[in-house]
Image (tube, rainbow, N blue to C red):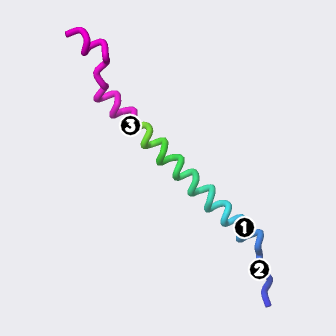
Amino acid sequence: MAKSNYQFQKRQKELAKKKKKEEKRQRKRENKVVETNDAEKNPAPSIDEDWSA
């Protein structure tokens, strides 16, 4: 009977977790950049401008 290599399995599982976490971090970073760009294109009117009328 062959002996299982648990260290290899554990390492593969850790690498998969690390990869998934990195991909999630990248998606969050991209979403943040998109939101920032949208805010720059469509800035909210300031309160001072509304009161000047």
Q: Position of residue 23 (x, y in %)?
A: 53, 52
**How many C-alpha atoms fall within 10 Å of the one at disc 1: few (<14), some, or many (≥20)?**
few
Read off the magenta span. 34-53
Which of disc 2 and disc 3 is earlier in sequence? Answer: 2
Measure the alpha-carbon separation of dots 3 and 1. Answer: 38 Å
Residue 9 falls in image quadrant: bottom right
Residue hosting label 2: 4
Distance CA(mark 2)–CA(mark 1): 11 Å
Q: Residues within 10 Å of mark 3 (few under 14, many from 20)?
A: few
State the residue in front, 33 or 50. 50
The answer to whether 12 is drawn above or below residue 25 in the figure is below
Describe the element under mark 3 as helix, strand or loop. helix
Q: Which of marks 3 and 1 is in front?
A: 3
Q: In this view, does 24 lie above or below 1?
A: above
In screen coordinates, is 13 left or right of 36? right
Residue type at the position of mark 2: Ser
7 relative position to 28: left or right: right
Q: Position of residue 35 (x, y in %)?
A: 38, 37
Q: Residue at x 30, y 29 (%)?
A: 41
Q: In the rendering, which numbered label is found on residue 41?
A: none
Disc 1 marks which amino acid?
Lys
The amino acid sitting under disc 3 is: Glu
Which mark lies nearer to you, 3 or 2?
Answer: 3
Query: Does the residue at mark 3 contact the one at mark 1 (Cβ under 8 Å)?
Result: no
Residue 20 figure quarter: bottom right
Asked if residue 36 is among those painted magenta in the image, a careful observer would answer yes
Q: What element carries label 1?
A: helix
Q: Main secondary structure of the magenta part?
A: helix
Residue 10: numbered disc: 1
Say if the magenta span includes residue 18. Answer: no
